Image: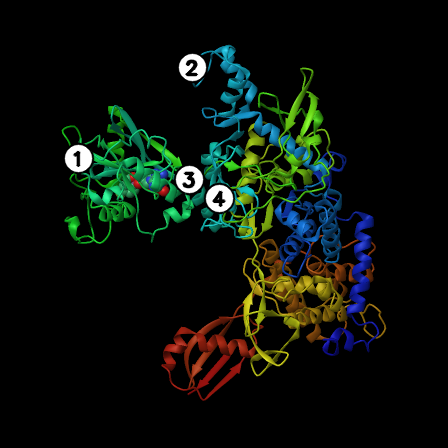
Amino acid sequence: MSETNPAAAEVAAPHRYTAAVAAEIEARWQDFWDVEGTYAAPNPKGDLAGDPELAARPKKFIMDMFPYPSGAGLHVGHPLGYIATDVFARYQRMTGHNVLHTLGFDAFGLPAEQYAVQTGTHPRVSTEANIENMKVQLRKLGLGHDKRRSFATIDPDYYKWTQWIFLQIFNSWYDDEARKARPIAELVAQFESGERALPGGGSWSALSATDRADVLGEYRLAYASDAPVNWCPGLGTVLANEEVTADGRSERGNFPVFKAKLRQWNMRITAYADRLLDDLNELDWPEAIKLQQRNWIGRSEGARVDFPIDGENITVFTTRPDTLFGASYMVLAPEHPLVDKFTPDAWPEGTHDVWTGGHATPADAVTAYRAQAASKSDVERQAEAKDKTGVFTGSYATNPVNGDRVPVFIADYVLMGYGTGAIMAVPAGDQRDFEFARAFELPIRCIVEPTDGRGTDTSTWDEAFTSYDAKIINSSNDDISLDGLPVAEAKARITEWLARKGIGEGTVNFRLRDWLFSRQRYWGEPFPIVYDEDGIAHALPESMLPLELPEVEDYSPRTFDPDDADTQPETPLSRNAEWMNVTLDLGDGPKRYRRETNTMPNWAGSCWYELRYLDPHNSEELVDPEVERYWMGPREGQPHGGVDLYVGGAEHAVLHLLYARFWSKVLYDLGHVSSVEPFHKLFNQGMIQAFVYRDSRGFAVPATEVEERDGAYYHQGEKVSRLLGKMGKSLKNAVTPESICAEYGADTLRLYEMAMGPLDVSRPWDTRAVVGQFRLLQRLWRNVVDEATGEVTVVGTEPGEDTLRALHKAIDGVRQDLEGMRFNTAIAKVTELNNHLTKVGGPVSRSVAEALVLLVAPLAPHIAEELWRKLGHTGSVVHQDFPVADPAYVVDEAVTCVVQIKGKVKARLEVPPAISEEELEKVALGDEKVVAALAGAPIRKVIVRAPKLVNIVT
Ligand code: ANZ
């Protein structure tokens, strides 16, 4: 590379902007910024209180999704978002805002632990080393972070507060009437006074300590439960639903995941389902992300309906109560608790052969079918293409609207974790029911009039008729008729009828499940929970926080054969008896306790980190309320408050962003923060992709060793294939920011990444193209500095009209582009202005040069600082005012251009006076009237006299 590197080749001019000059400038200014604390965000209590001018400025809290300090370090794809927020933050600083911008590290969790296990070093040692390495890498990019506010989630004085928040959540319950979380003590008071009845009846004072703990466990927002969880033997830990892929495997590692009953901690995020949904409306987020959250929360409006059976009821959840007259059988999830009860000893008279699965008794059939269902993930069970399977339980229930006897089946397409775990099956209106009914020869009643011309004879149908846009038929009894009603009306009418008759009620169901919150890992926050001798969980008092992660010899997780579902997790912390078994005084004298040995999931630390940036050294409270209000509080246009800009990858759509929103709401309800939402505006940056070269065996070969010849690619003489893919070590195509900084400097790297395309679009990295931005900086430099002498060349005379127009148009455009985060087009405008100055030639007016430097400052801060200094200023450019365009020079006076074809005027165009010949020709030939007049005739010649005349000869 070095022979063709202009930075090396052009050293002839001693004061040219070269890689060496860039390196020297950049290192010097990075030191300067650190020493001066240039990026220190003002503190509302100290700095702003004493400075009314500063206090009057609007604020901008600008954040990136913080990185995992992985062992591989950063490649050029990682900082794309960091550079973008940095440019934006710099622009905001220069336009009169108090800006808070910093970056911490998300350092607990599986990747760090796996890396530690691989390398045989303690996760703290390897993680801290990785953080240091990343800091060095990031510093080179010239990011304007307030470093006083940086931290890692593994710092005990950070996770002290993660544990503290856990305890707030543990010590609160959701009051459905008030629609908010309240302290659990207030619930206890209600039980004590009798204001609220105990769910099981009786009086609070008569309950044992264990019973009380059990009752409260049903209310607490953080609670332990024995519900079935996602157990991943290959990782040796349980996982949250959000961490399981659509095909039932672990998102990390791609191992099988099984349902297992294990006592685990959960967060009652479901209590917030409706608020998490409603509050999305006020957020400035990409629609795609909002949609993913809405789908994940999955609100369905429908009804619960009771089907009588042997003096009891089976309650179903349906979104289509209007189809009740078409319910011809029922299905329970195989795990439904009522199945055993309604499995008689023998098959009833006349049981259809296909219903029995070939088993002698219903019990045999049920047992065999359950075993089969248990080996499948929920996703496999619900797969659309799958053949419908199931068995008859041997019992019949009654359809409450028409008295029909409906057989009760168990089938795996019905899940225990959704609705009531039981359905009424309407084969005419639901495709899964239709397929099941065909397989098991069950009646299919037409209760919705098809609108697609297929007719009402269901024996001729190939599929269910699932449309909502139709009328109900064949649906009446002595008391109610739905016939002729459209679906929505029929739904409302039948729901009202069911409620009046006491056999059902309207209800809203959510797909969202509670958040499984414990992991059987070492590298996470310990739970601030201990168990007494009766197994009752107690919160540690705040004075015992942080509960530090103990140093252990063996921190590796116990993993198992990935396919062995019958394994049990083992927590690394339980191997440390001394840490686990303790004597503590929790207020009632010293007693023996056992610590919780699970750790929190890696999402915990990122659920509240925005708050810590605000008040990073507070050891007394989570965050000072005044400070929180200043940076995060509600404002006009941001009714829920939150960070002003949050940039990160789209892959966190539901996991991190949903969890963080949930914690935010709990903290808000309990009065700890004034913002209901953590992130007001979200922006997803695209990915930097890279070419992956593979040999004939499909193995990636190092991208730097590939040669191109006649459009084909070769590695050591062998032809290789080329495809666009991810950048990374494993694909042998990673480019490090250091290598680009060494070759051109960080300012060039920053410009290149921002110029590659719109920020939200993925783009291929092309090292050969980086030089283009380097040349731009060289021209910029040349417009201010004499390359031969190093003297500043600017003059005091005013610029000409043309230059003023070019300047003010650039200022106007760059302002709009930076505000709108269109960094690529902002760079194009700077380039245009710079080229204009080069073309005009001669020394540049000081006023123009200074404005140009200020325009460049957010994008390429080091060179801007240096030129600003050379232009005679003493301070930093960082807090200068961004130039303001003079509108008089921005408006284009348009000129009328006449277009002639063979001398006859065919069109008149309004064009800018400065339009180039080429541009004008393009515009003229593309004009509708001209195209029509040409009617496809071949063009012999185009004569252009910009800006007034175009003559086309055909
Ligand atoms: C009768 C019916 C008729 C249904 C019809 C649909 C169409 P969403 O929209 O996702 O909420 N269902 C209910 N609980 C279920 C469970 N535990 N496992 C599998 N399926 C379940 O879906 C709700 C619909 O899915 C419910 O409405 C029920 O089928 C089914 F023409 O009831 B429906």
Q: In the rendering, which numbered label is found on residue 676?
A: none
Mark 2 against mark 4, which lies toward the viewer? Answer: 4
Q: In the rendering, which numbered label is found on residue 511?
A: 3
Question: For the point 66% across and 36% down, which residue is it?
Answer: 575
Q: CA distance from mark 3 to mark 2?
A: 30 Å
At numbered mark 2, what does the secondary structure look like: helix, strand or loop? loop
Identify which amino acid the numbered label 3 is placed on: Arg
The residue to which callout 1 is attached is: 349
The residue to which callout 4 is attached is: 565
Is the C-beta of the residue carrying label 3 under 8 Å from the nearest atom of ligand 1?
yes
Mark 3 against mark 2, which lies toward the viewer? Answer: 2
Q: Earlier in the sequence, mark 1 or mark 3?
A: 1
Q: Residues within 10 Å of mark 4 (few under 14, many from 20)?
A: some
Is the C-beta of the residue carrying label 2 under 8 Å from the nearest atom of ligand 1?
no
Q: Residues within 10 Å of mark 2 (few under 14, many from 20)?
A: few
The residue to which callout 2 is attached is: 201
Q: Earlier in the sequence, mark 1 or mark 2?
A: 2
Q: Give the quadrant of residue 877.
A: bottom right
At numbered mark 4, what does the secondary structure look like: helix, strand or loop? loop
- Asked if 642 appears above or below 213 in the picture, the reply is below
Q: Earlier in the sequence, mark 2 or mark 4?
A: 2
Q: CA distance from mark 2 to mark 4?
A: 39 Å
Mark 1 against mark 3, which lies toward the viewer? Answer: 1
Mark 3 against mark 4, which lies toward the viewer? Answer: 4
Residue 615 image position (x, y, % from top left) = 70, 36
Identify which amino acid the numbered label 1 is placed on: Glu
Residue 658 image position (x, y, % from top left) = 52, 41
The answer to whether mark 1 and mark 4 are in CB contact below 8 A is: no
Tell me which image quadrant ligand 1 sits in: top left
